[in-house]
Every structure is written in C-alpha cells, then in structure tokens.
Image (tube, rainbow, N blue to C red):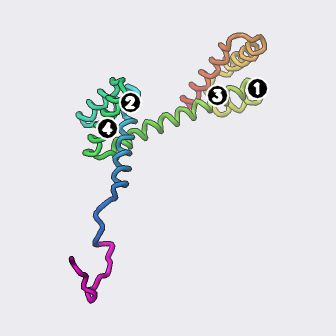
Amino acid sequence: MRLIDPDADLEFDPDSVYDGPSKSQKKREVEALQDLGNELVKLPDAQFKRIELPEELREAVAACRKITQNSALRRQRQYIGKLMRGIDPAPIQAQLDAFKGVSATENAKLHQAEKWRDRLIADNEALTIFLDSYPETDATRLRQLIRNARDEAARNKPPKAFREIFRVIREAMQAG
C-alpha cells in the first residue's frame, strides 16, 4: 500500500495532462469523414468523374456505388471512411461545396425565371420591365407566346407556350 506524502506539492496542472482529443471527439471526426465519403457515393456520375480523388479512394467509392446489399454497403462505407482518414479531406470538401454552390445558383436562376414567367403572363407591365432588363430579347415573339399562354390557360390546353416562355426567359437571362 502506497501512502501519499502529505508534504508533497500536488498542484494540478491541466496542460501537462492533456493527451489529445477525447474519444468522443475522435468518433465525431471519423463520422464526419464517413459522411464526406457518403456524399462522394451519392454524387451524380458526371460530378464524380470530375472530382479529384486518390486512386484507391476512387475505386472504393466506385465499388460502393455498385453495392446494393445493406451490410456490404455499410462495410464499404466504413472502409471509405478509413481511407479518408489517411488523406486531407479539405480539397474534397471544397470540390463538393463548389458542386453544391453551382447547383444552388442554378436553382436560384430557375426560380427567378419562373417568377418572370408568372409575372409576364399575369401583368402586361411586366413585359416592359423585362424588356428593359433584357433588351436583346425578341419582344414580338415573347408577346405572341404570352398571348398564347393566356389562351391556353383559358381553354385548359396543354401549356406549350407556357413552357416556351420559360425557355425564352432562361435564354435571355443567360445571355444578359
């Protein structure tokens, strides 16, 4: 039995005891890497081909994309997480964020085009505003499409002109 010397200086210094991140912190980091790997697995083919990955990781992700059985899929995802621990995830995350940013920007543009289309069909003044914003647009064609879209809506016909207005607006927004 060891006795503690009551005269000994027993000051606690937390800086000298720190052994690195806690077990919970390590688990969170590993799970974050696995989540990043899952994002790679879920990427569309076109984006997956463009992303820069180490060859071994690319092969593991490609294999995971082909697996359908749940337990095998789980094991493969864990393996991807293990591979991710050996590389710097920041460039991969940056590429994924860039893909998401492009998608978000495209979605915003599509929503704006939809709003323009709805305004153009609902309000005659909107055409003037749109043509001021996008002067290279063929005004005659757009007026014709708006008339046709209103007529289609009144007669419950398929929205052919409605869709065509959207295409014209989208082209004008891309050009301007």
Compared with 40, 24 (above or below) is: below
Report if residue 47 is visible in the image.
yes
Is tag 4's residue or tag 3's residue first in the polypeptide sequence? 4
Is tag 1's residue or tag 3's residue first in the polypeptide sequence? 3
Q: Mark 3, residues whose alpha carbon is within 10 Å: few (<14), some, or many (≥20)?
A: some
Residue stretch in magenta: 1-15
Report if residue 49 is visible in the image.
no
The residue tagged 1 is 122
Residue in front for this viewpoint, 160 or 143: 160
The amino acid beneath tag 1 is Ala
Q: Mark 1, residues whose alpha carbon is within 10 Å: few (<14), some, or many (≥20)?
A: few
Is tag 2's residue or tag 3's residue first in the polypeptide sequence? 2
Q: Are marks 1 and 4 in contact (CB under 8 Å)?
A: no
Q: Give the distance between the C-alpha atoms of the residues marked 4 and 2, in whole angstroms.
A: 22 Å
Element carrying mark 3: helix
Q: Mark 4, residues whose alpha carbon is within 10 Å: few (<14), some, or many (≥20)?
A: some
Q: Give the distance between the C-alpha atoms of the residues marked 1 and 4, in whole angstroms.
A: 54 Å
The residue tagged 4 is 78
Q: Are marks 4 and 3 in contact (CB under 8 Å)?
A: no
Mark 2 vs mark 3, foreground winner is 2
